[in-house]
Every structure is written in structure tokens, then in C-alpha cells.
Image: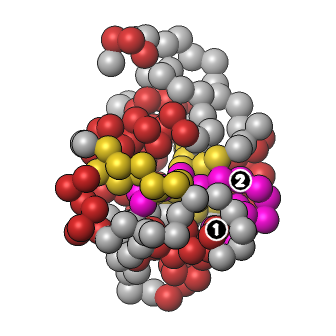
Amino acid sequence: MIKRLTVFCGSSFGTETIYEEKAYALGKQLAAEKIGLVYGGANVGLMGTVANGVMENDGEAIGVLPHFLKGKEIAHNQLSELILVETMHERKTKMNELSDGVIALPGGYGTLEELFEMMTWAQLGLHQKPVAVLNINGFYDDLLKMIQTMTDKGFLKEINQKMLIVDDQIDSLLNKIKKYEAPKVDKWISKDEV
């Protein structure tokens, strides 16, 4: 059962208004389905937009923000809860603890780093949660081609490639997330070894 989802996304809006529109629509849909949001805690860019979509529709939004970013990213002051942590790694760990899966929206280096860390944790068997991208207006098309190349060239197993859920529509993406079953693969390491 999906009670909360972590959303990774940009702290800017990008060049196309559809990114902001879809971020808000995702937040609104999460609220409608009583799925809580866990995200980076900021009130700027797509981060603030997805949180506003949740909060303005009576949903739950939990932000996780490192102390050193509180001033730079401008903490959202209307969340259900804002958790302040010391480091970026602690931020991701806390977000993982609080959620039942991940969705990545458009973003930059930070969004990709967060997405791939969650995919790596899944590949290593450290969690069995769904990890997804909302491929708004083809934003992730080139990245998906690169992941296919990694598979074709023998650097990524096909079973691990298929762990990443991809859709360009919110409803069908959420349905795929709810139906996700992690592949049966041997764990490389235990959670305690990380």
C-alpha cells in the first residue's frame, strides 16, 4: 500500500510552463488519492509547486531540508511538517524512511543524483520500493536512451533496467507504482553494510 511518495524535482521551473503545470497536477492528484508527499522542503521551483498542489488540496506534505539550505532554498512555511537535517545524505535517508516509493520530475544534477541513488539502492536490494519518472514532454527521453545503451553494452542487467517505471501521464504512472512488484534478485549487500 502506498501511503507516501517522495518526489525529486528541480528547485527552478525550467523553460516550459508544462513542467510547473504537471508538478501542481501531481500534487493535487496525490492529495485526491490520500497519498502523502515527501520532498526536499523548499518553496521554490517545481519543489514548491508540487507541495502547493498537495497543500492547497488538503493533502499531507512533509519537507526534509538540510540546515545549510534553509536560507538558500527558502523553506516552505505551510507544510504539514518540515524536518531539518544536517547533510544531503541524511536528507535522502530520511526521505526514503518516510516514503513507499519515488517519482522524479524534471530537474538538474540533484534530481538525477537522487533518482540514481534510489535506483542503485533498489539494484543492490536495499529496498523494494517503486522508483518512477514522470516523463513530462519527453524530458527524460535522452536519459532513457542512455539507460538502454548501458543495458545494450552490458553495464546494466535488463532486470535492473526494468525496475525504473516510466510514464508521461500522472494517472497511469500512479497505477504502475501501486502495482509494482520488485524483481526477485539476490541482495549484493545488507542494509547494515552500507
Q: Say which of 52 and 142 sits in front.
A: 52
Dot 1 or dot 2: first in sequence order is 2
**Label 2 is placed on what type of residue?**
Ile
Magenta-drawn segment: 25-41
Quadrant in which the N terminus is drawn: top right
Instruction: Count residues near mark 2 (Cα–Cα under 10 Å), then give few for <14, some for 14-19, many for 20+.
Output: many
Regarding mark 2 in the picture, which secondary structure is present there? loop
Question: Which residue is painted at 64% across and 68% down in the image?
Answer: 54
Q: Which residue is mark 1?
A: 54
Residue 96 on image: x %, y %: 49, 38
Q: Is residue 124 left or right of residue 168?
A: left
Question: Which residue is painted at 66% across and 76% down in the image?
Answer: 56
**Label 1 is placed on what type of residue?**
Val
- Quarter of the image for residue 76 reads bottom left
Determine contact: label 1, label 2, CB under 8 Å: no
Q: Which residue is mark 2?
A: 35
Question: Which residue is painted at 50% across and 88% down in the image?
Answer: 17
Q: Can residue 37 be found in the magenta stretch?
A: yes
Residue 183 on image: x %, y %: 63, 25
Residue 12 on image: x %, y %: 35, 76
